Amino acid sequence: MIDWNIEPFVTVGPIPFLASASEVRAILGSDHMTFPTTPLVTDLTDAYQSIGVIVGYDANNRVETVETVRPCSVRLGDVSLLGRSEGLVIKELGGINSITRPYSDLLVVPALGLSLKVEDGVVKLVCASSRAAFERYKQLLETVALKRAARIERRQNQVPPPNPFKPTDE
């Protein structure tokens, strides 16, 4: 099993942020699938399924995100992240940096550029980002949060339409 250390905004194991796709492929080998990040985004992603690593590239084919799932094992110093209780991870990282939870299944550690996907109380995916990619991600989360807050405020201030079935006092 692979056991990699994350150096925030610098490396995930042997993969440096801003390395070229060809450099990553030389490090990790040819056992991967390459595909667009999303149907609307043409930036490429390499998935190394056998080791549990997904590398996302920017428009210049430079590493901007590294996602890890089992069987990979990643840690931040002495703190192991994958496959552990979110409570333990929060406790162990909590003293280091603030952790936010924009969604019920997502933990974000802004100072470290990390996102952790949680399922059934266990960290199942760790995404480490380059500084530029994480800044874009934070802006997206802030925009979503602002839209959510505005939607909630509109609902709270909305006067319900009259009920046509309710008898009037006439």
Image (cartoon, rainbow, N blue to C red):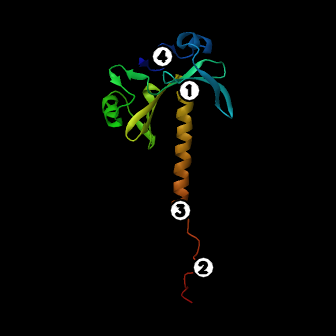
Q: Residue at x 48, y 16 (%)?
A: 11
Where residue 139 sits in the image (x, y, percent)? 55, 35
Which residue does the numbered mark 4 point to in the structure image? 11
> Tag 2, which secondary structure?
loop
Q: Earlier in the sequence, mark 3 or mark 1?
A: 1
Which residue does the numbered mark 1 point to in the structure image? 133
> Tag 4, which secondary structure?
strand
Q: Is residue 146 visible?
A: yes
Mark 4 or 3: in front is 4
**Dots 3, 2 in contact, CB < 8 A:** no
Q: Is residue 107 left or right of residue 149?
A: left
Q: Residue at x 55, y 43 (%)?
A: 144
Q: Is residue 162 left or right of residue 3?
A: right
Q: CA distance from mark 2 to mark 4?
A: 63 Å
Q: Earlier in the sequence, mark 1 or mark 4?
A: 4
Image quarter of residue 93: top left
> Tag 3, which secondary structure?
helix
Mark 3 or 2: in front is 2
- At label 4, the amino acid type is Thr
Q: Quick one: 132 or 72, which is closer to the camera?
A: 72
Q: Is residue 109 visible?
A: no
Q: CA distance from mark 3 to mark 1?
A: 36 Å
Which residue does the numbered mark 3 point to in the structure image? 157
Q: Is residue 102 left or right of residue 64?
A: left
Q: CA distance from mark 2 to mark 1?
A: 52 Å
Mark 1 or 4: in front is 4
Query: Which mark, residue 70?
Result: none
Q: CA distance from mark 4 to mark 3?
A: 47 Å
Q: Residue at x 57, y 81 (%)?
A: 165
